[in-house]
Image (cartoon, rainbow, N blue to C red):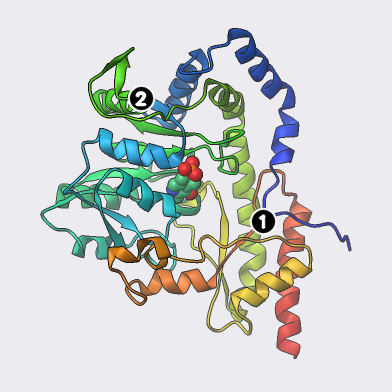
Amino acid sequence: MTNKIIPFVDLKLQHDLIKTEIQQAVETILQQGDFILGKALGEFESAFAQASGAEYGVGVASGTDAIALGLQACNIGAGDEVILPVNTFVATLIGVLQAGAKPILIDCDPQTALIDLEAAAKAITSRTKAIIPVHLYGQMVSPIQLLDFADTYKVLIFEDAAQAHLAHRDGYQAGCVGTAAAFSFYPSKNLGALGDGGMLLTRDAEIAKKAARLRNYGSSQKYVHIEMGTNSRLDTLQAAILLAKLPHLSQWNRDRLIIAQQYDLELAPLAAVGIHPIQNQSGEGHVYHLYVIKVDDTCPIERQQLQAELTQAGIQTGIHYPIPCHLQPAFTYLGYQKGDFPHAEKLAEQILSLPMYPGLSHSQAREVVAAVSNVLTIQYSK
Ligand SMILES: *Cc1c(COP(=O)(O)O)cnc(C)c1O
């Protein structure tokens, strides 16, 4: 037995692998000195849009801004209602609020943790302008069902693809199902910068142009400001680094999928003791930003204890996310209450994210499963 810690993520592994490429990218930007809206930004915007099957990419300072500015670029704001899942990273909600729209929170499917479109249908009003499907954990919300939803209720689809770079499902790629899509390049995302970053993808030239203005003080021509904007550009330096990392993304996603398939297989016997992976309904198109299990009511121990014992055993885990958006102190003013979203609330108590990153070895994944199994066996024999 080793006593080495298995981390939740290990970014050093991927960066060591491509260190010279990153150093070259940094060196080039130092030489060129075009740090803001430079050449490498345009190149990365095109390359990422093309890789994702979209027409235009607009690099911004973060995934949060990609949502906020992206919605504004789609002309969504004050007086408009925007539907989003309650079990997402809080940035989805913040983006909607920053755009000035009214967020309408929706519960999730307990098996996939993805937004429940039947519940969303019941929340439609005459003011509903858009739905934000969050492709949570790297799995896309069904594009066919989404397009049907958008068509039935005449709303725009704005994807939160912050966890789903190059994910696909039913022949659709993440980022091209709807009118526009937001991506994050936060360091630990499937494609991560060495700092913050984000991008809006769209097939609509006008939306792309407006987003490009909004991120640059509402200006497309120096010192002429035709609308209210902000300063939210993706640094040329980060774009150059992301451009160097992009060719590796497909392989990294495949590595994640293989680890997930191993987890699926080896965790299967633990279903008998209440351990269930969040369901993959999109096959090989799932990019496993996170691998999440549920510790259900039939399990002899609670999630909190399992997590504590895994930590003891040197296995680092995470919880994504422990508090659903409607129960966050900052958002009580929205008027939701405990009990409003039973599936999401239950998941928040039962989910646990296992180590997942490109470079996590077969034997490490096996150790993770063995540790989970071990904790439960000891528990049963008590
Ligand atoms: C990371 C993330 C965001 C926000 O991206 P930042 O770059 O951190 O601002 C938004 N939505 C989801 C689902 C995310 O995981």
User: Depth check: 71 or 123 in front?
Assistant: 71
Instruction: Assign a secondary structure to mark 1.
Output: loop
User: Depth check: 56 or 219 in front?
Assistant: 219
Badge 2 crowding class, 10 Å Cα cut-off, few under 14, some 14 to 19, many 20 or more, is many
User: Where is residue 237 shown, x and y percent of the image?
Assistant: 57, 22
Q: In the image, what residue occupies the spot 73% across and 54% down?
A: 7
User: Where is residue 252 shown, x and y percent of the image?
Assistant: 62, 39
Q: In the image, what residue occupies the spot 25% across and 61% down?
A: 120
Q: Earlier in the sequence, mark 1 or mark 2?
A: 2
Q: Is mark 2 within 8 Å of ligand 1?
A: no
Residue designated by label 2: 56
For the residues labelled 1 and 2, the Cα–Cα distance comes to 34 Å
Horizontal side, residue 251 vs residue 12: left or right? left
The numbered disc on residue 274 is none
Question: Is there a contact, CB below 8 Å, between mark 1 and mark 2?
Answer: no
Badge 1 crowding class, 10 Å Cα cut-off, few under 14, some 14 to 19, many 20 or more, is many
Quadrant of residue 341 in the image? bottom left
Q: Is residue 107 above or below residue 248?
A: below
Q: Is residue 144 above or below residue 185?
A: below
Q: Is residue 228 above or below residue 181?
A: above
User: Where is residue 320 shown, x and y percent of the image?
Assistant: 53, 60
User: Where is residue 31 shown, x and y percent of the image?
Assistant: 63, 9
Q: Is residue 240 above or below residue 111?
A: above
Residue designated by label 1: 355
Instruction: Assign a secondary structure to mark 2.
Output: strand
